[in-house]
Image (tube, grey):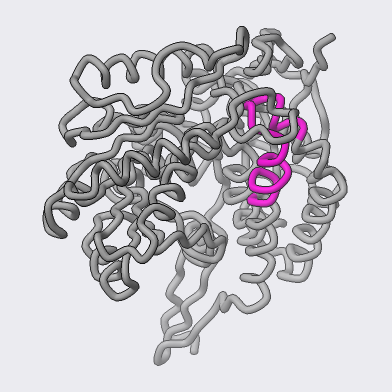
Amino acid sequence: MSAAYHKFFINGEWIEPEGRETLEVINPATEKAFATISMGNPDDVDRAATAAKSAFGSWSNSSIEARKEIISKIIGGLKSRGDEMASAISSEMGAPMGLAKTAQLGSGLGHFMNVLNILENFEFEEVRGTTKIVKEPAGVCGFITPWNWPLNQIACKVGPAIAAGCTMVLKPSEIAPISAYILAEIIADSGLPAGVFNLINGDGPTVGASISGHPDIDLVSFTGSTRAGREVAKAAADGIKRVTQELGGKSANIILDDTPDFSRAVSGGVAGCFGNSGQSCNAPTRMLVPQSRMEEAIEAAKAAAAKSVVGDPSAEGTRLGPVVSEVQFNKIQALIKKGIDEGAVLITGGLARPEGIEEGYFVRPTIFANVSNDMTIAREEIFGPVLSIIGYKDDDQAVSIANDTDYGLSGYVSGEPEHAQAIARKLRTGNVHINGAGPDFSAPFGGYKQSGNGREWGIEGFEEFLETKAMMGAA
């Protein structure tokens, strides 16, 4: 029997939505519904935005200590309900339980803990000559978040917004909404005043568009596809809203000839691309290797792919779960076929489900070699476990290929440290991971070009939720 999550959290209460339409939430490993949610409409957005606007005056003037206390309670709630949260994430978007308990849950916790640290030392006022510069809450925020890292993407918006003194309306992805519902219950128990945080479910064209264009919402933060990001920006434009966006990516992983352990760097790149079943906007999906070492890279990549155990997300040892939906599965299959048709060399994987798997949206971990950067699989964001290996002749060509993309979210470079850093500086991306360095919650996260604008995470992400006021003559 499906669990019912039909109420919205508005103005501190769980209430019936205005709309009566419901949607089944599908477990991508079984292709069966495990929950239902209500689908909101513009009237629900209006109620939530009105509540957030009403709460802003008080919460924007709350003490830093009060904000820290709330965030601490949210952290405690996430820890106490961690297993439940991980299980929800695994069920709604297919992450293996090991990944759900560590990276998926851990990233959400990491953002709340990071913003707590920021509040310990952040200076909301400074003096320049006779002027006092004051940082104030930006206002009512509208958040539209995706399904691939559901808690992570909510936490890195909600955490700093609460800490900055903003109020908010959240619309999580209707594909993976249950983790957001659990977080809302945790927030409801934290003592946060009514109206500061509001949760409604719905789809992008209805609820997302209404949030983006609502006159009482001052700032919109969106994470998702570049295509949808354009629509959010258009809807927000009439209100001259502040818009921050974290969009798509097609990140290059440059493995330099002087990399101390070449095979290990290739293996790490395969694991990075395939992690979360390839459903990460910053995944290293284009591996650039010296043309003279292409065969060596192919062998190392093939060996690494063989370790990518695909299967039941609840089973011990599963590395890759399903992709999130039938729509995504079909898109990935079409792009794999496109790679084959355009002449890329299929090293491993390919079309159809992995052998022995009869149901679920499972994709074969797939590697193409001798890919040229003008092929479709090197241009489009596939959002599945599909890696393209591209050869280069020298550093200049490697940098040129890496930057030859509409995106600029992340990049990866392996090599002797000084050499790797020199190459990293030439990449037109918001993030670069050098020699296997992992994510850092205190570092800003965001992209160049069509990967978005603004930053999340760290102090820079916190400051996105602040306005700057200059008070001349106040010092």
Q: Look at the picture and state if 364 lies above or below 81.
A: above
Q: Residue 180, located in which quarter of the rendered image?
A: top right
Q: Height in image: 463 above or below 74?
A: below
Q: Position of residue 272 (x, y in %)?
A: 47, 45
Whether residue 145 sits left or right of residue 431 in the image: it is right
Q: Residue at x 41, y 59 (%)?
A: 433
Q: Residue shown at 55%/37% (left/top)?
A: 307
Drawn side of residue 145 relative to residue 105, left or right: left
Say which quadrant the N terminus sits in.
Answer: top right
Number of numbered discs present?
0
Viewer-nearest residue: 120 or 391: 391
* Residue ID at (18%, 52%): 398
Can I make out residue 265 in this image?
yes
Name the foreground residue: 412 vs 68: 412
Q: Is residue 104 found inside the magenta-colored segment of the image?
A: yes
When the figure is inspected, residue 250 is found, relative to residue 423, above or below; the finding is: above
Residue 146's quadrant in the figure? Answer: top right
Q: Is residue 72 left or right of residue 260?
A: right
Magenta: predominant secondary structure element? helix
x and y percentages locating residue 2 in the rendered image: 80, 12
Report the magenta residues as a range. Answer: 87-107
